[in-house]
Image (cartoon, rainbow, N blue to C red):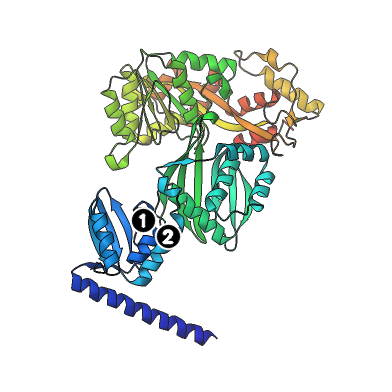
Amino acid sequence: MAQAKDLAEKLLKQRREAEENDAKRRAEKLGLRHINLISVKVPTEIKAMQLVSETEAKEALAVPLQILRKKLVLAAFDPQLPKTNALIEKLKKNYDLEIIIVSKSGLEHIWHYYQYVTDESKEISGRVEINEVNLKKLQESIKSLEDLNKEIKTFESPYTSEMLEIVLAGALALKASDIHLEPGEEIGSLRLRVDGLLHTAYAKFPPIKHRALVARVKLLSNLKLNIHDQPQDGRFTIKLKDRDIEIRTSVIPSEYGETIVMRLLDPSALKVDLEELGWRKDDLEIVEKEIQKPNGLILNTGPTGSGKTTTLYAFLRRVVKPEIKIITVEDPIEYHLAGVSQTQVDLSAKYTFASGLRSILRQDPDIILIGEIRDEETAEIALNASLTGHLVLSTLHTNNAVGAIPRLIDLGAKPQTLGPALSLIIAQRLVRTLCSHCKSEKKLSDETHAKIQEFIEELPERIDKRTFKDFKIYGAGKCEKCGSLGYRGRTSIFELFLVDEEVEEKIYKSPTEIELKNLAKQQGMVTMQEDGILKVLRGVTSVEEIERLTGSVPWLK
């Protein structure tokens, strides 16, 4: 049996070689290029294939491969055949043609991609129409991950586009921020990131269905369908009547196929009012005072996905007015803000944070937002801008607020510039909020109750301790409203490090993080964990959630 299989494979290989050699001889005779479409990875573009229907392509023994402005690459078996020649003359009217000679097997290999060129895809221009009636029905029926599983399991349509519609609608209904399509050895899985945590939505995608979904997403995102061993990034937009939802697509090769992550940027999910972000009243007063200043550098620190940019957008929303010029340089622009000039990093055009910031300063802005300070050049320009009459907002990757100062010094910032330039450093994390419909009160021991009262008494004077007089602690439950997750939505926990004269003097001496922490404590800083505990005492979140993000709180059990 094995010998017969080997013999069949050997004969097929010999036949394919003979076919390609014949195509090569025809190409030499005509003075044209020859390409083996099967063994050579040719980037085939769907937008080129859309120029010729599948029927016409097969009748003409040809297929468009690539298009760049007016230049079109056409693969043909023999351009002298009548139907091929007629197609060439037709395309020549609008395009500069480059004809390459290929074998019939090569053409059949590429014609296979016509399965992705549907009538719908021919109208794609980076925007996707989703039937709002269907979307509304799906959102009404999908209340939990189990509901989404049921919709996928009972799906019977042969159209992959409709399957993707269910996935997207489910993600929107569950307010997911990311969709993960991951291949496996025998089955693939669908996971959704809801309120910061990944949940398996469906784990039974057979390889053929996974590949079809990947191809559909790549098609919508204007990515190369026949490139499977390289990372690709793209985007598309779901156009609804009341808003546009942008989808950022990332495709990477993995052991069993291609992994796709889609980031959903839904404008309705953006909280741009400061009060909605979870500030305590005393911290909000400090922030309000600092963002109204004409100059200075305000930094927001934390890991990726901790809500830093959303907070900075809320600052801009609070201060924007016609007489103030606000310009941003971001990577990428996540949400559009009215009254703000937003620019995006473009490495191909050599528009980086540093070069963008330099250009922005020539536009005479009052307030500047820099997506992130990553290098010495950006740090230096940002610091100097804050010293020359600009209010500068930016983010930095550090674990806490005080860690921003050693980090900037490590990047090459000069202490004599850093001290006077810095105004306020914020650190934040996003914690899940308890579902108000199913959270349950926890019984506290007398010892824990006493320790909580001691914690409240030791808080800085600026905190109104009367609001925590009758505190209660709650735990997560399960109900239909939260999809049996126990949590619904997220809020922020913060810590603020105000750079006053004492801190500025300390910066000149290149202080350690421990020295800065002690100084912050003397200043009356409320740490992120302490802010989280206060939210626990107000019934906003749970002890487990605070511990997940800030570490153990052994006395609060």
The answer to whether marks 2 and 1 mark residues whose Cβ atoms lie closer than 8 Å is yes
Judge whether 397 appears above or below 183 on screen: above
Residue at 46%, 58% (x, y): give it.
115
Residue 197 in view, yes or no: no
x%, y% of residue 528? Answer: 58, 28
x%, y% of residue 117? Answer: 43, 54
Question: In the picture provided, is 45 more to the left or to the right than 301?
Answer: left
The residue closer to the viewer here, 473 or 264, is 264
Q: Quadrant of the N terminus?
A: bottom right
x%, y% of residue 395? Answer: 43, 30
Amino acid residing under circle 2: Tyr
Q: Which residue in the structure is indicated by mark 2?
A: 113
x%, y% of residue 67? Answer: 30, 52
Mark 1 crowd level (few <14, some 14–19, many ≥20, 10 Å Cα):
many
The residue closer to the viewer here, 134 or 65, is 134
Amino acid residing under circle 1: Met
Cα distance between the residues tagged 2 and 1: 9 Å
Q: Quadrant of residue 423?
A: top left
Mark 2 crowd level (few <14, some 14–19, many ≥20, 10 Å Cα):
some
Question: In the picture provided, is 449 more to the left or to the right than 40?
Answer: right
Q: Which residue in the structure is indicated by mark 1?
A: 49
Helix, strand or loop under label 2:
helix
Judge whether 30 appears above or below 437 on screen: below
Question: In the picture provided, is 258 more to the left or to the right than 85?
Answer: right
Helix, strand or loop under label 1:
helix
